[in-house]
Image: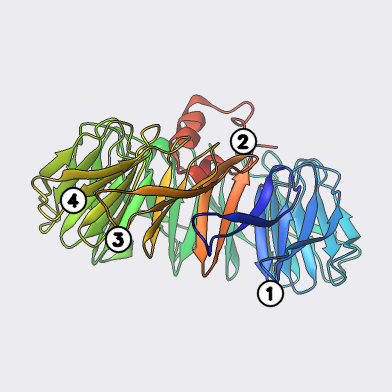
Amino acid sequence: MTGLQILDVSDPVSPKRVGGTAAGNVLSVAVSGNRAYVAAGLRGLQVIDIGDPTQPQAMGELATGGNATGIAVSGSLAYVAASQGGLKVIDVSAPEAPLLIGSYRGRAAAYSVAISGAHAFVTARESGLEIIDIKDPTNPQQVGVLDTIGHAMSVSVSGDYAYVADYRGGLQVIDIRDRRAPQAVAAFPTSSYSLHVAISGKTAYVADGEAGLEVIDVSAATNPQRIASLKTDGSVTGVAVEGKHAYLAVGDTGLQVVDVSDPARTLQVATLDTPGRANHVVVSNGYAFIADGDAGLELVNVVDPANPKRTGSFDTPGSAQHVALNASYAYVADGAAGLIILDVSTPASPRRVGACDTDGFARKAMISGKYAYVSDDRAGLQIIDVSNPSNPVKVGSYDTPGSTFSVAVSGNYAYLADSAVTPEPRNASPILRSFIGAQSDEARNRPPFP
């Protein structure tokens, strides 16, 4: 049984599963109040009562007639992008009996959904952007459509405009003041494959596949202008922000430092080629700590961000995926080698003080109190007492039914994202395969192309 897993970890020696749902492959979840709303692939929508973490209750379920890949909740209504099933409007006011009250099926699969006022904006890949009037949720009606030149992957709405990441079509700017007649007012050809867009003020930030980050001024919507672009030789897999700079882990390229003091004029100020594959980075006290794949942990002096200097390193026995810091210690999720603990009080000469071999493939480590909680892929959750860093002791574990990619701990409970491995998108280009393969664990398990 994969899905939402809730564990009681008040006694780390004996973690107990206190609830879960047979939700199938969980692709998206939204939480509102004491309920979780799950887009569960072919299982459709699931509503789960999480008011009492010790007794989560699967309150209701509704098949959506397609592969539920995205969900948005507004008030008592859930809006589900159900792939070939289209957009589903579901009344969840009676969570035990979610009721389909309306649906709209367009020309192509519904990939994602966003709600703005009385309208739903649905990205429909090859059919572009569809605008659905949801004032009467029992009878959603398409009021407008714009067939973009590429494949609509993501949409962000700001004021009178919708901004669409249109895959090969770059960034599309669409005037939506007349919902019935949306007009493409500008197209900005990006260098690669536009996969995601975010708007901040009058600036659009476009994730552009292997081309890196595009920063585009949209203050004049009809005339978007490139302000800056950050060319990465690989796909960005991790980012940390410290002060006026962003530090990017860029796969085989290593560390890139970007001046973000003026978001409209992001500027790459330095690159440092690490010996391995930079998977994750954290910054603390003037140093960047990089989980560098087969090369282990790299320590880089970034006191002068424009001149990063490799200070020290430690070749861990596995493949460093993720690093967490606590006091003078670095906790490295080291893949098949488990958890490696390093004393980094002297950055020039980090030294190994302890290790704990987990049962699976350590992907992430988080520290809470005297325990390390390790997301251990197919081996579920591993709980390790690190009160004595030189002698870490595994005190508990819970083997989830699927693959554990992420964990959050709050009080006495651990909440695990547990899902089957998502297949590679069908008909994906080599560049898109590379992009998806290089993303973080969460990104690798986003819904595939419908």
Graded by Cα atoms within 10 Å as few (under 14), some (14 to 19) or many (20 or more), the crowding at tag 4 reads some
Q: x and y percent of residue 376 in the render?
A: 48, 41
Disc 3/disc 1 C-alpha distance (Å): 31 Å
Q: Does label 3 or label 4 sit earlier along the sequence? A: 3
* Quadrant in the picture for the N terminus: top right
Above or below, 166 against 246 in this view is above
SS assignment at label 4 = strand
The residue under the point 65% across, 40% down is: 401
Disc 2/disc 1 C-alpha distance (Å): 29 Å
Q: Is residue 420 left or right of residue 255?
A: right
Q: Is residue 263 left or right of residue 162?
A: left
Which label number is shown at residue 422? 2
Q: Is residue 144 visible?
A: no
Disc 1/disc 4 C-alpha distance (Å): 42 Å
Disc 3/disc 2 C-alpha distance (Å): 30 Å
Of circles 3 and 4, the one toward us is: 4
Q: x and y percent of residue 136 in the render?
A: 87, 70
Q: Does label 2 or label 4 sit earlier along the sequence? A: 4
Residue type, numbered disc 4: Asp
| Residue on which disc 3 sits | 241
| Residue on which disc 4 sits | 343
Circles 3 and 1 in contact, beta carbons < 8 Å: no
Of circles 3 and 1, the one toward us is: 1
Which residue is more in the foreground, 299 or 221?
A: 299
Residue type, numbered disc 3: Val
